[in-house]
Image (spheres, grey):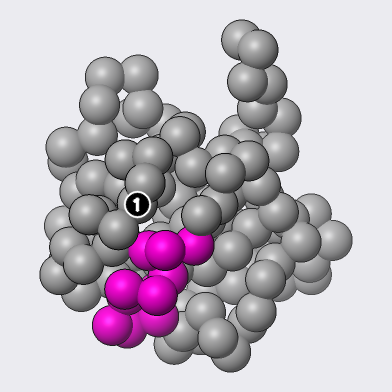
Amino acid sequence: MPYVIAEACIDVMDRSCMDECPVDCIYEGARKLYINPLECIDCGACEPACPVEAITQDRAVEDGQDAFVDDNARFFALPLPGRAEAIGSPGGAAAVGPVAADTELVAGYDARG
């Protein structure tokens, strides 16, 4: 099962996990990082590198964080605002660079509740 990045990453994006990922499957949105589930090799190198503990296996997310499992996949499967096509599986984040967009869940997220 691939790893996912949940709520704690929103507006933090430390990027330490990106340095640890051996397959470059962590992509940068406008407010949050996303792990490509088709590129993740489930090695777990990213999880201990996250200072806000936002990364877990998709089947082990904390209660109330389940929406982020599908949302991570949605970032790659659907066209994001300002993009004509979905990101898909380009074979690494370096080829894409930072994406100046997020999914609806993250773009509309309000930390105040």
Q: Residue at x 40, y 80 (%)?
A: 24
Question: Is 23 inside the magenta-drawn segment?
Answer: yes
Please indicate, yes or no, whether residue 11 appears anywhere in the rendered image: yes
Q: Position of residue 66 (x, y in %)?
A: 33, 30
Q: Position of residue 84 (x, y in %)?
A: 79, 70
Q: Which quadrant of the figure has residue 52? A: top left
Camera-nearest residue between 46 and 61: 46
Is 111 on the left or on the right of 34, as rendered? Answer: right
Q: Position of residue 35 (x, y in %)?
A: 40, 61
Q: Is residue 37 above or below residue 51?
A: below
Q: Is residue 91 above or below residue 1?
A: below
- Quarter of the image with the C terminus is top right
Q: Which residues are magenta?
A: 15-25
Q: Which quadrant of the figure has residue 109? A: top right
Q: Residue furthest top?
A: 113
- Quarter of the image with the N terminus is bottom left
Q: Residue at x 67, y 71 (%)?
A: 98
On the image, numbered disc 1 is attached to which residue?
50
Q: Residue at x 52, y 74 (%)?
A: 88
Residue type pointed to by label 1? Cys
Secondary element under disc 1, as helix, strand or loop, is loop
Camera-nearest residue between 83 and 4: 4
Q: Residue at x 45, y 34 (%)?
A: 8
Bin the neighbour count of mark 1 within 10 Å (Cα to Cα): few under 14, some 14-19, many 20 and up: many
Is 44 on the left or on the right of 26, as rendered? Answer: left
Is 10 on the left or on the right of 108, as rendered? Answer: left
Is 9 on the left or on the right of 64, as rendered? Answer: right
Q: Which quadrant of the figure has residue 10? A: top right
